[in-house]
Amino acid sequence: MLENLQHIIASTRRFAIDEYFVLALLSVIVIVTFNPDLSNSSKHPRFTWILIGILSGFWVLYGNQLAAGEEVKLFYDSIIIDDKAVFFKRLILVTGIITLLHHRFFDYKIEGEFFIFLLGAIFGLFLVVMTTNLLVLFVALEFVSICSYLLVVMKKGKPNVESGIKYLLFGATSSAVMLYGMSWFYGITGSLNFADPAFNAALLDTPAWVIQVVGFMTLGGVLFKLSAAPFHAWTPDIYEATPTPVASFLSIAPKAAAVLVMTRIFEHLSVDFVPVLTVIILLSLTIGNFSALWQTNAKRMLGYSTIAQAGFILIGLLVNNTTGFQAAYFYVTAYVCITMGAFVLIDLIAQRTLNYELESMQGLGQFDVIISVASVILMMALVGFPPTIGFTSKLLIFSSLWDVYQFDGNAIYAVVLVFGLLNTAVSMVYYLKIPFYLIVKPRPHKMTWLYVGFWKYILVAFLAFVTIYLFILPENMIGWVNGFSFLK
Amino acid sequence: MNSILLSTLIFLPLVGSLLILLLPDSFRNSYKWIAVVVSILNLLNVLAIYTAFDVTKSGYQFIQHTEWIRLKLGTLGYVSVDFLLGIDGMSMPMVLLSGIVMCIGAVASFTIRQRQKAYFALYCLLSASVMGAFISVDFFLFFLFFEFMLLPMYFLIAIWGGERREYAALKFFIYTLVGSVFILIVMIGLSMSVADPFFSDELGAIVHSFDFRVLANEANYLPDRLLHPDSTATILGMPAREFMFMLLFIGFGIKLPMVPFHTWLPDAHVEAPTAVSVVLAGVLLKIGGYGFLRIGYELMPDAAYQFTYWVAGAGVISIIYGALNALAQTDLKKMVAYSSVSHMGFVFLGFASVTSEGISGGIYQMFSHGLLSAMLFLIVGVIYDRTHSRQIADFQGIFGKMPLYTLMVAIAFFGSLGLPALSGFIGEFFTLMGAFQTHLFPSWVALLGALGIVLSAVYFLWTFQRMFLGEFKTKSEFVEKLTDLDNREMILLFSLALLVITFGIFPNLLFDITNETVSYLLTRF
């Protein structure tokens, strides 16, 4: 008994920084609760800045959470803090900071609860990246999901409620499927911790197809977060209806966490996920890219594009070795500045034209050099066109795929390689639409645009600059991801 | 001093582009002059390199090497990219051509009136990436420039083009992008199969290099890799290296363009403004041929050997099909565009022969076609600027009205149809000579290629006869507008004509440069 208590106390101590984060979350709840006028007063901007400061503070704190090469297991192995977890926590914090900056610079009038749910989602994602226990994973994912549902329906418009319901139904279904899969795993192995060698050993005695089906179900909730097909249907509606900073956050932070969870599962289990994953990748690429082709709304288009991007990230997991995992991490990291930059960009355009329709941005770029240059850079980064970090990340993903192909010889890899690369050519058609409408199309007669402030330009210019800067000097970034070791 | 000449070729236009972007609108009239000055400085730079070029060496010269990207990834080792520039007998003619054509294009752009800032900034950007593609000695760098030049080209066609410009620009972009995706696969495959011996030792891990010199050396291929020269692996049922060569064949074939992947070209040319057509035909198509030679033939000679039938076949089909199409056109610009398809077919025919004459002839043909097609498109531009019509049937007997113009047209047409003493003759003659000599494919293939020359004589002479000879007859509203060349057009066309004659009479200006490199290349077969 005493031993148990001591373990819990020791774990609690080691877990301190995350507990401080919970404290911060609770204080935000208190502040928001007792300041009902937060959204209407001058307190609002100040409060956002304070939160940005707090998140940056945690970013620094997490940098020192671990000594080099250290790995900590707490609460009877239900929480695991390693270098990957720390890296992803900091990455998620960066997305949170950019979300808040986006929110601040674009003067969104959102009620104070926004901050609670945002921080709640961030904390949920922290838990997601810190566990190898299926049950903790499930609870954490639900934590994130509930915060995300609320983020989506906070703005009380009809489309919000509609898409919120859609999100909720799809999310609940995926969670149910996931829980069902987990219960199978528990039944087969008698353990909830998939990092446990006994867990994997028990799987070896079970027919492979059973494990593949169960594994697919268990991944359901994660794939939902990754918005990979066939768990993708919610994505475009949510993106269209929610305020852009929220959409931008949802498009990347849960994805990053999902990638980490999947690498953890893949590295510990000796299950052949190749057939299932190949289907998911091909579906995601096809559905994402080909649906995006017909979109007329920039935000919806980006929604479909994130489905396709999920397919590209999954290629790194298909490779299923250290090289592939690192390439996937690189991709996700690069994707933070690219996709958030794209969202900020279309928001900037929308503030000048008052809506997100591609038609209405005709000719704007001819009078706005920063928007036109940034749109070319960011959209080409999404395509994976040099000289942007998007190219480097796609190059690494496909190099790792080639590497596994040349030793394994499985024709599936070659198919995915060719199919994936041809898909980048398809994706170019719709990504190019934004620069096309901005720069090539003439301005409609007597069209005028609203003036927008300086800081919005700074944000988008900064993110566009980062995508090129990281292409020219990627050493730092590759240094972040190639230190991670995996069991495979 | 020599060491920075090459990077200046890239960075000078970049600086020019930035300068144009940053100058406020009150300097509106200086944009075009900046572009012209940049192009002329680049041409002088190219000429300096040309004169200092050592013709007795087969390898790269003026090498400039800066380490750039080292990405370590898992068990893969390092992916290493260097900012590596150099020039050899294959790229020197292309660089010379680019220097000339970009100059001509800049002056020809003076007719652009709308949105000059964007136009000339993009033009300089295009100039930088064209130069970069020709002088890169690193596959990654080559690909970077190869792919990047699509963007300025896309906007140049899509904004300043004709009526169906958006369609044509997108078609151009998609076709070339699909091609470059194939090339990207080859790039990944090749570099994943080699290890740079020097840096692998230094860093203690496999360093996958993109350096052409490393990729060309069979000793650097790792024994267990898919693309090792002795590898027996297959990809989707084909031997791995041949599969890769096929991808290159299609990828660069789209760019060249070869039939049946040529359909973007007539659209792009017809819609593009004159100066952009000049650059597109004069330089951009050459990157297809150059890249195929540089990467396909130099890096995978064994696979190239297996593909001679395909390459020669594609060449001959392009020659004949392009010529027949040209014959059927009523639009002068479309006729010129199809004649481009036809003439670029000779390049593939020459390469496929794998003889010294054929390959040198192919390079010469690219060079000469660059000059001649630039001239042809300028000629179309002259008449279009005056009358806004390009229909051959709208004009008859304009010799009397525009004698100087007719003279220029005659030189361009006769040069293109292969009249001796003009540059087109040398290229076609040598490619056909190579094609007849080779034992790799039967000589009737070469004979079909020769038929293409006859056909080109037919459509050029027929067009010349219809438009320029006979009684003067045109639409009444055109009569006033048909004035002879102005000074600017005269300078452009005269200088090109002079070059066409010079290179027709002194082919050694180019052959001296290519000889060593080509004979070294042939030792690898």
Image: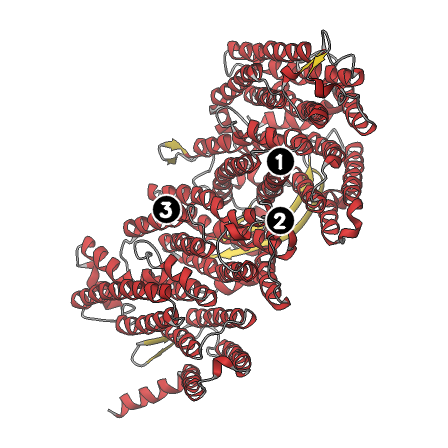
Where A92 falls versus B380 (above or below)? below
Q: Is residue A477 left or right of residue B45?
A: left
Q: Is residue B259 left or right of residue A235?
A: right
The Cα atoms of the two marked residues, 2 and 3, are separated by: 35 Å
**Image location of residue A104, percent across then percent down:** 54, 73
For label 2, count other residues whose C-alpha is less than 10 Å away and answer few (under 14), some (14-19) or many (20+): many
> Residue at (49%, 74%) from the top-left corner?
A109
Q: Which residue is mark 2?
A: B82
Kindly identify the amino acid type of the residue bearing the numbered disc 2: Asp
Kindly identify the amino acid type of the residue bearing the numbered disc 3: Thr
* Residue at far bottom of view: A2
Quadrant assignment, res A8: bottom left
Q: Which residue is mark 1?
A: B161
Quadrant assignment, res A238: bottom left
The Cα atoms of the two marked residues, 3 and 1, are separated by: 32 Å
Kindly identify the amino acid type of the residue bearing the numbered disc 1: Gly
> Residue at (64%, 55%) from the top-left corner?
A368
Where B394 falls versus A175 (above or below)? above
